[in-house]
Image (cartoon, rainbow, N blue to C red):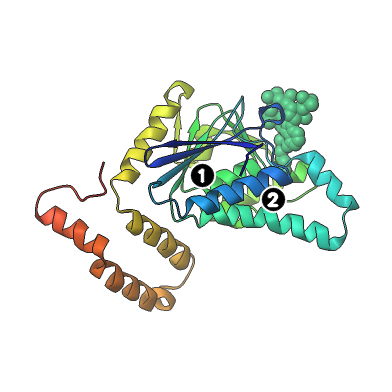
Amino acid sequence: MDLERLEVQFDGPVARIWLNRPQSRNAFDGLMVTELRKTLFDLRTVDGVRVVVLGGRGPSFCAGADLQWMRATASFSLEENLREAQALADLFFTVYESPKPVVARVHGAALGGGAGLVAACDIPVAALGTQFGFTEVRLGILPAVISPYVIAKIGESSARELFLTGERFESVRAQEIGLVRAAVPEADLDAAVEGRVQELLKAGPRAIAEAKALIREVAFRRVEDVQRYTVERIAEVRASPEGQEGMRAFLEKRKPYWVP
Ligand code: COA
């Protein structure tokens, strides 16, 4: 697919996806939503790729949904309007459930849907001074489709404050509330991202996909309701080729085959 809104680089086991609409601070319109979703979806089956890094070209990571595009939905039929909102929801879900871990490289601003995109990623790393905010209510709209991912990361208490005020906040606070995992000087951002990537490359690729599925299934459920599921998962995975290789490598004091 020819990409107008993204740039994708392949770097050994790492795919780097850059939102590439800097003149609009990488605000996403219908085309960016389609391209990003399809790119992530296609990467699921690219064998050599084990980690995805998502960043933004230009001064900002992502200014959220394109407000021109959001405004235009007023002239849509209810059905079209729902279809567009569903496409957006599908994008966040594709990031969230990607079997390849997604590290976000966040700088400049991550607002509205841009902050939602951060929340849907596995390991967001931000430059100090990045502006975050769930600004939707200040625009008279709602952080609706992003809310499951954001609330999962920051909890109800922070969501009540930040969704209701729409106020902007910076990286240190974003780290304190769990929206990002690290806040580092901008000059160190690439090195910090690379550090996360290297840690991920030490893990079995299938084990990572299984661990992501496990978190999705177990989070927010009663232990009694998920215990059988967890028993079945470990029983299968420890007998799998990757599980066998990982444990054998440890016992033989060598690296498993997936470690570069
Ligand atoms: N949708 C559409 N266009 C957007 C946009 C958005 N979400 N965010 C920024 N832009 C556009 C601006 O309108 C401007 O266009 P112009 O050059 O034609 O005037 C261009 O991007 C640059 O924006 P500007 O504000 O001049 O850049 P900045 O670097 O000073 O600030 C932001 C960047 C992201 C901090 C600022 O643009 C902003 O606060 N945007 C609103 C973000 C928001 O609330 N998003 C929530 C959406 S749900």
Q: Quadrant of the C terminus?
A: top left
Residue type beneath disc 1: Ile
**Quadrant hosting residue 227:** bottom left
Q: Quadrant of the N terminus?
A: top right
Q: Residue furthest left?
A: 252
Which quarter of the frame holds ligand 1? top right
First in residue order: circle 1 vs circle 2: 2
The percent coordinates of residue 203 (x first, y second) are 30, 50
Circles 1, 2 touching at the beta carbon (< 8 Å): no
Does 242 sit left or right of 31 as displayed? left
Q: Residue furthest right?
A: 75
Which residue appears at 71% of the width and 43% of the height?
A: 65
The residue lying toward the viewer, choosing from 95 and 214, is 95
Residue type beneath disc 2: Pro
The percent coordinates of residue 196 (x first, y second) are 37, 39
Query: Could you classify mark 2 by the number of other residues whose Cα lies within 10 Å: few (under 14), some (14-19), or many (20 or more)?
Result: some
**Quadrant hosting residue 138:** top right
Q: Is residue 162 visible?
A: no
Query: Could you classify mark 1 by the number of other residues whose Cα lies within 10 Å: few (under 14), some (14-19), or many (20 or more)?
Result: some
- Mark 2 C-beta to ligand 1 under 8 Å: yes
Q: Label 1's element?
A: loop
Which residue appears at 88% of the width and 59% of the height?
A: 77
Residue that label 1 marks: 177
Cα distance, mark 1 to mark 2? 17 Å
**Quadrant hosting residue 194:** top left
Q: Nearer the viewer, mark 1 or mark 2?
A: 2
The percent coordinates of residue 155 (x first, y second) are 54, 54
Q: Label 2's element?
A: loop
Q: Is residue 32 visible?
A: yes
The percent coordinates of residue 160 (x first, y second) are 64, 51
Q: Which mark is residue 143?
A: 2
